[in-house]
Image (cartoon, grey):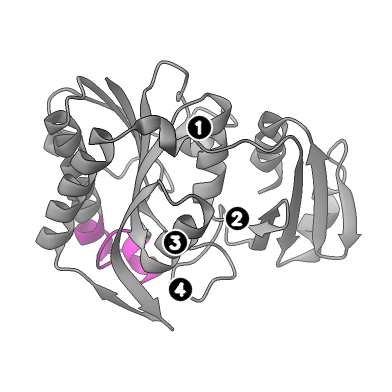
Amino acid sequence: MKLYISADIEGITGVTSWEETDADKPAYEVARKQMTAEVAAACQGARQAGVTETWVKDAHDTGRNILAADLPLETRLIRSWSGHPFEMVQELDETFQALILIGYHSRAGSGASPLAHTMSGAITYVKINDRYAPEFLFCAYTAAMLKVPLVFVSGDQGLCDEIAQFHPHIKTMAVKFGTGEATNSLHPAVAVERIRIGVVHALAGDLSQCLVPLPDHFRLELRYRQHARAYRASFYPGAKQLDDHTIVYENDSFFEILRFMLFAS
């Protein structure tokens, strides 16, 4: 079995402040070590479940956060950004049997995490077909295009609750919850062990049940904090400006939605 793992940092246990997500700040080192440990646990769980090849995408900020030497030997690590529209799951293709997301977080506009956002701090919310969209949803629909099941997600409780409503067969593991600017997190070692066990269980079931249905048409609504960003995005072919801060783009192809987001977010 060939597995793809995409990892972010804002949904890692203990990570609470933007300073902890910034490589230029002292607090970042603790966060990146825990991010690495949670990804390594997912890789270990996958190996226990019979996975023979695991690719990991470091999908936070620079894409150069995970400590490669701390991952299992059979792991391949994708660092930095190629510029492909798949972004957080770049190089995912039909040869993978499953997708896992580690360290993912609540969407822009959510009160479930002090680090809630979608793609960029410039965006106040994103909707896909009138559903508020976390970064998880972009990964889920990308996997759906390729017929790759999304089987497991770890992150904050708010995101896990959204996923349960979106697709009940996708396994989740909440490592923390947010209240205002605070978080309440599992002990780092407990989070690591629960992720390992969760991945084992997720890969042991009928993976086809985790395939995400792909809509026939997509209406993307994007609201910016600054009106100038919306004005600029309105010149993308097919985009329409609803008001000073809001852009709408529609297409039957989700790849075209991803292409728009690459240039607009």
* Secondary structure state at the residue bearing disc 2: loop
Label whose residue precedes the other's in the sequence (3 or 1): 1
Q: Are marks 4 and 3 in contact (CB under 8 Å)?
A: yes
Q: Which residue is mark 3?
A: 159
- Mark closest to the chain's N terminus, 2 or 3: 2
Q: Pick out the residue farthest to the bottom.
A: 180
Give the alpha-carbon distance from disc 3 to disc 1, as whole Å: 18 Å
Q: Residue at the spot x=81%, y=45% of the render?
A: 249
Q: Main secondary structure of the magenta part?
A: loop
Residue 246: name its quadrant: bottom right
Q: How much space separates mark 2 and mark 3, taking CA atoms?
A: 10 Å
- CA distance separating discs 4 and 3: 8 Å
Is residue 41 at all visible to an observer of this figure?
A: yes
Q: Is residue 78 visible?
A: no
* Residue to which mark 4 is pinned: 112
- What amino acid does circle 4 point to? Ala
SS for tag 3?
Answer: helix
Three-letter amino acid code at disc 3? Leu
Measuring from the top left, give residue 31's x and y in whole percent. Answer: 25, 59
Which residue bears the numbered disc 1? 143
Question: Is the residue under label 1 in contact with that under label 4 (CB below 8 Å)?
Answer: no
The quarter of the rendered structure image containing the N terminus is top left
User: Which residue in the structure is indicated by mark 2?
Assistant: 133
Label located before the other in sequence (4 or 3): 4
